[in-house]
């Protein structure tokens, strides 16, 4: 049984440039949690990773009372990294198969340390901009599109009820 479902997204204009991430926790027709953060000088992959770290921090700070957590992301890079590559990288002194240091190693190491503590987390890839409500909401938060966020809430008859400490806009 899945206890919590999160959607994460990262965005960047310029890459590097101004970026942000969005995190949504959905439960049927309720938004249980939403968060966004923006950064003046970043990359898309860093924001994707920061969103995942945000979810893992929630689990860590709440002593993860959940038996199962799914994090949906439209980032193939992040999903492949967390499901496959990160374990090899950790055993290979944070180097890729070509012997080069991996990019964003500071964030990757942070994800790795948190992920080791939370085996209940499963990463699943979703197609971006394909109408998946949670992903569209996370995208709206990541890009700072408040109007899109509010329109999606109305369109899908969602109610914002927060059982976590809420951070929005």
Image (cartoon, rainbow, N blue to C red):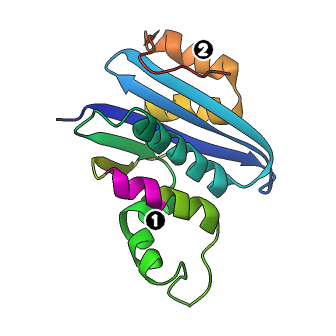
The residue that label 1 is drawn on is 81
Q: Relative to 150, does residue 41 appear above or below in the rendering?
A: below
Q: Relative to 126, does residue 83 appear above or below in the rendering?
A: below
Secondary structure, mark 2, is helix
Q: Residue at 63% across / 21% down in the picture?
A: 148
On the question of residue 77 being in view, the answer is yes
Q: Position of residue 36 (x, y in %)?
A: 63, 31
Q: Residue at 68% across / 35% down in the picture?
A: 37
Disc 2 crowd rating (10 Å Cα; few below 14, some 14-19, many 20+) is few
Q: Residue at 81% across / 52% down in the picture?
A: 14
Q: Relative to 32, does residue 40 appear above or below in the rendering?
A: below
Q: Residue at 35% across / 36% down in the picture?
A: 63
Q: Is residue 42 left or right of residue 9?
A: right
Pair 2/1: label in front = 1
- Residue that extends furthest to the left in the rendered view of this protein: 1
Q: Position of residue 132 (x, y in %)?
A: 43, 33
Q: Main secondary structure of the magenta part?
A: helix
Q: Are marks 2 and 1 in contact (CB under 8 Å)?
A: no
Between the C-alphas of marks 2 and 1, the distance is 32 Å
> What is the number of callouts on the image?
2
Asked whether residue 11 is drawn in magenta, I would say no
Q: Nearer the viewer, residue 154 or 88?
A: 88
Q: Quadrant of the C terminus?
A: top right
Q: Which mark is residue 150?
A: 2
Q: Relative to 126, does residue 63 appear above or below in the rendering?
A: above
Q: Nearer the viewer, residue 64 or 155?
A: 64
Asked whether residue 116 is drawn in magenta, I would say yes
Q: Quadrant of the N terminus?
A: top left
What is the magenta range? 112-118
Q: Is residue 87 left or right of residue 21?
A: left
Q: Position of residue 83 (x, y in %)?
A: 36, 63
User: Which label's residue is closer to the chain start, 2 or 1?
Assistant: 1
């Amino acid at each position: 049984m899945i206890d919590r479902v999160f959607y994460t997204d990262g965005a960047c204009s310029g890459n590097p440039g101004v970026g942000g991430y969005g995190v949504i926790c959905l439960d049927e027709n309720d938004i249980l949690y939403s968060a966004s953060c923006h950064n003046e000088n970043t990359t898309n992959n860093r924001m994707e990773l920061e969103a995942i770290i945000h979810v893992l921090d929630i689990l860590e700070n709440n002593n993860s009372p959940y038996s199962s957590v799914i994090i949906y992301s439209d980032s193939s890079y992040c999903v492949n990294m967390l499901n496959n590559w990160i374990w090899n990288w950790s055993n290979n002194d944070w180097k890729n198969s070509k012997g080069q240091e991996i990019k964003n190693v500071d964030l990757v190491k942070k994800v790795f340390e948190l992920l080791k503590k939370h085996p209940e987390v499963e990463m699943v890839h979703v197609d971006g901009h394909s109408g998946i409500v949670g992903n569209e909401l996370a995208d709206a938060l990541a890009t700072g599109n408040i109007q899109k966020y509010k329109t999606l809430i109305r369109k899908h008859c969602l109610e914002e009820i927060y059982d976590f400490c809420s951070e929005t806009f």
